[in-house]
Image (cartoon, grey):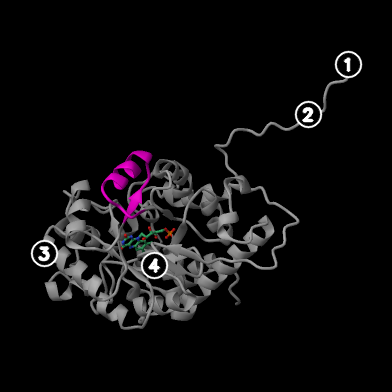
Amino acid sequence: MEITNVSEYEAIAKQKLPKMAFDYYASGAEDQWTLQENRNAFSRILFRPRILIDVSKIDLTTTVLGFKISMPIMIAPTAFQKMAHPEGEYATARAASAAGTIMTLSSWATSSVEEVASTGPGIRFFQLYVYKDRNVVAQLVRRAERAGFKAIALTVDTPILGRREADIKNRFTLPPFLTLKNFEGLDLGKMDKADDSGLASYVSGQIDRTLSWKDVKWLQTITKLPILVKGVLTAEDTRIAIQSGAAGIIVSNHGARQLDYVPATISALEEVVKAAEGRLPVFLDGGVRRGTDVFKALALGASGIFIGRPVVFSLAAEGEAGVRNVLRMLREEFELTMALSGCTSLKDITRDHIVTDWDQPRILPRALPRL
Ligand code: FNR
């Protein structure tokens, strides 16, 4: 059957993957309220399209941290991609590079930073989880730097793993032929089976719950790479991120896998953008499945978006070709949205092109009463 949108890959992945793997990719935390809300909130934002504008040429290109990319659609870090497809992170890296966009590699990738770099040229960011053993962190950051990664996305919403009940029921663990490849040489590459989620146990053993803003400063003493703080949802934390030297912010709720009942990222975005006051770029991930979603995020002030699950689902279905297809479909839908809204470049997209449910009701001109 022909695939005509990004969301269709989920059902194919469900058919193809073992239940334990699919559930790990698909689930959110606890009641999965935020998981649904990440999608629903997009559907409550409507367009105010402008008409009769020459849209024969549309420019989707943009610059992220000084790197020119083909479109404001990038790849979020998702762990264990070889569980979806034997080529895993290699396939994702090639697809991102072919599309002219950025891939973020997870700390918990099943391919190492060096292996991903060996796939060829491409602009890549490295997502960092901070381990209790800071020597491990320092070594890993150095390796990412040497392998040509251009920025660190520091994930700040995971001092403890969120409660993903499907993983608990499934006793989730990595298949025996896979490891957390970046940590293999450090003797931290194996995830043991546990009597709940194996990943939750791994996190409680290795990940540093003391992580705080002073560590954002510490990170800057061990690397020159720009730091994106991934997991900000409030104006308060936006201001502290700026003071702490962050190069950018990713508004993220970790794909609704950490704290349930946080708002959808698209609902939190504008608060963060306002607090940022243009001093650093703000990005968003969470629930982006359509070109219209990309447009809505940009209209609310995002400099770009990242996609998570669509990558693992399309990888499971069709490997590299699947990820390429996801990036192509989102690109085409986004371009179409721009055309039908009367925008020919990203700077044309404004807050007035959308209306949200937190906007003031617009006062419509009324016919004057006849005297
Ligand atoms: C993630 N996410 C994530 N984030 C991170 O910082 N490090 C990681 O290793 C992972 N791993 C991971 C695995 C899977 C299967 C998912 C679904 C998510 C979160 C990810 O980077 C991103 O925030 C969300 O996936 C974005 O939401 P969507 O696009 O999946 O709705």
- Identify the element where label 2 is drawn: loop
Q: Quadrant of residue 357?
A: top right
Give the mark nearer the N terminus: 1 vs 2. 2
Give the mark nearer the N terminus: 4 vs 1. 4
Q: Where does label 3 land, which residue?
A: 135
The verdict on residue 229 being magenta is: yes
Spatial CA span between label 4 and label 1: 68 Å
Q: Is residue 301 left or right of residue 337?
A: left
Give the mark nearer the N terminus: 4 vs 3. 4
Q: Is residue 45 in view?
A: yes
Q: Residues within 10 Å of mark 3 (few under 14, many from 20)?
A: few
Residue at position x 24%, y 71% in the image: 145
Q: Amino acid at mark 2?
A: Arg
- Identify the element where label 4 is drawn: helix
Q: Amino acid at mark 4?
A: Phe
Q: Where does label 4 land, which residue?
A: 22
Magenta-drawn segment: 228-248
Q: Are marks 4 and 1 in contact (CB under 8 Å)?
A: no
The front one of 143 and 333 is 143
Q: Amino acid at mark 1?
A: Leu
Tell me if the residue at label 2 has its CB under 8 Å from ligand 1.
no
Q: Where does label 1 land, which residue?
A: 371
Give the mark nearer the N terminus: 2 vs 4. 4
Given this view, does label 2 or label 4 mark the residue nearer the observer?
2
Ligand 1 shows up in which quadrant of the image?
A: bottom left
Q: Is residue 112 in view?
A: no
Given this view, does label 4 or label 1 mark the residue nearer the observer?
1
| Image location (x, y in percent) of residue 131 | 17, 60
